[in-house]
Amino acid sequence: QVQLQESGPGLVKPSETLSLTCAVSGYSISSGYYWGWVRQTPGKGLEWIGSMSHSGSTYYNPSLRSRVSLSVDTSKNQFSLNLRFVTAADTAVYYCARGSSGWSHLDYWGQGTLVTVSS
Amino acid sequence: DIQMTQSPSSLSTSVGDRVIITCRASQSIDNSLNWYQQKPGKAPKLLIYAASSLQSGVPSRFSGSGSGTYFTLTISSLQPDDFATYYCQQSYSNPTFGGGTKVEIK
């Protein structure tokens, strides 16, 4: 059974970098599929942040592209999100997910982690 | 970005009722449309992909249809476990989600 688990700080200061990691079990991320991040806020709903193929190609939401980077650590079977220069608007529940058929549909999700941006 | 509009935003209904949720895209997305169910405090769960394909393990009372700009999610006979919020998502271009439809108990 594929499982994803987010980890990282729950509180980040404005202008700093939000860093989250998603540990994957039950499947080797280097074997296939796409892997990425979605966030959810009461105001904007669900928002795709970015995704990456198992071979390392990355795709970012144009509205966040200048601040986002994704990376993968195949030795630990995990992937990571960095979001720079955060503001209160980046406060959200962040989910990692697996994409099937490219990043077509998301068939496995982490449980989500709340990140609050505040001084 | 392609905008996804769901209706209604909420509905009150009873166990056993037939429920239909609609999702409209701001431009044609062929059949690149997925449906998710989300319960409070939980991650979304994939129900339907490619407009009408049932995800493995999802009960057959859920079905999807549509193409182009108009799509529907139908729950043939609502069960107690189905009270939740439902989202559509397009995968034709940079993924975007609808605003959600909350299905509540009447």
Image: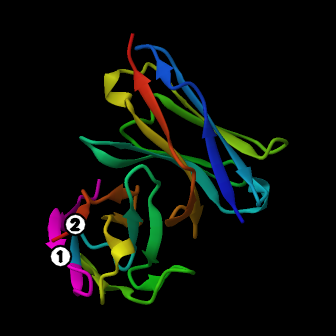
The label on residue A47 is none
- In 3D space, how far apart are the residues under numbered discs 1 and 2 (Cα atoms)? 6 Å
Subunit bearing disc 2: B
User: What's under tag 1, amino acid-wise?
Assistant: Thr
The picture places residue A36, in percent across and down from the top left corner, at 56, 49
The picture places residue B15, in percent across and down from the top left corner, at 26, 81
Q: Is residue B18 magenta?
A: yes
Dot 1 and dot 2 residues touching (CB under 8 Å): yes
The picture places residue A39, in percent across and down from the top left corner, at 42, 43
Residue that numbered label 1 is attached to: B13
- What range is drawn magenta here? B1-20
Camera-side residue of B68 and A33: A33
- Viewed as shown, does residue A76 lie left or right of B29? right
Subunit bearing disc 1: B
Q: Mark 1 or 2 closer to N-term?
A: 1
Secondary structure beneath label 1? strand
Residue occupying image coordinates x 51% and y 26%: A10
Residue that numbered label 2 is attached to: B104
